Image (cartoon, helix red, strand yellow):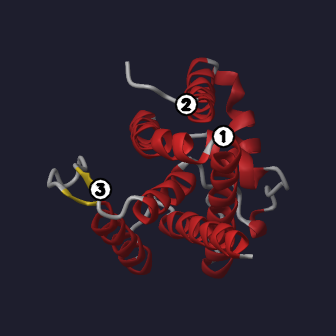
Amino acid sequence: MPFIPPVTKAFMLICVGVFCLLELVSGLGGLQVMLALWPLNSGNFSFWQPITYAFLHGDAWHLFFNMLGLWMFGSELETVWGPKRYTQMLVASTLTAAAAQLVFTLVMGSTAPTVGASGALFGLLLSYGLLFPDRIIMPLFPPIPMKAKIFVAIFGALELLLGITGSGGIAHFAHLGGMLGAWLLINYWRGARRR
């Protein structure tokens, strides 16, 4: 069994546990409504949702791919940074992903909720590309070995393109917001180190 550091393991276990609980207990649909990230203009928005939405997932595939990404990128980042900085990155990426999605839904007039750890995952993805730019990785899609910096650039460009063209059902701007949060926090850390 591959090593999974404590914060990554806890985040994964909470996400899987919440998903299983909501799937098994049909009467908890109200909990999902309460924890999802609702647009500001929906009348359902609450102040805790910019964090709690990250623990919910739309279906088993959404959960699987987010947990796979957390394990692939998060485990090594947590090992390098330690639990405190790694947790700061997860929170920053989750919050900036939520902020980007809230702005997007407000501008577009959408009232659909957002769920998933994808914003945090995209923050980890950008972090991985910045820390290990020349590391060769083998993504599932496409299964072509490439440098981490190329992989991150391709995914970022795809998210922007899909967000602009309005590919429905996926919070592309939340993903980009997660990447922005990671970039801002890493630059803050670098600036603090120079002082």
Residue 24 shown left or right of residue 159 in the figure: right
The residue lying at 35 percent from left, 66 percent from top is 155
Q: Quadrant of the C terminus?
A: bottom right
User: Could you say where residue 170 lies in the image, as x and y percent from the top left?
Assistant: 46, 60
**Label 1 residue SS:** helix
The residue lying at 56 percent from left, 42 percent from top is 78
Nearer to the camera, 95 or 37: 95
Q: Which mark is residue 135?
A: 3
Q: CA distance from mark 3 to mark 1?
A: 22 Å
Q: Which residue is mark 2?
A: 5
Q: Which residue is mark 1?
A: 83
Dot 3 or dot 2, earlier in sequence: 2
Q: Quadrant of the N terminus?
A: top left
User: Could you say where residue 186 lies in the image, as x and y percent from the top left?
Assistant: 60, 67
Nearer to the camera, 189 or 120: 189
Quarter holding residue 18 = top right
Residue 16 shown left or right of residue 136 in the figure: right
Quarter holding residue 194 = bottom right
Dot 1 or dot 2, earlier in sequence: 2
User: Could you say where residue 91 lies in the image, as x and y percent from the top left?
Assistant: 69, 53
The residue lying at 57 percent from left, 35 percent from top is 8
Residue 115 shown left or right of residue 137 in the figure: right
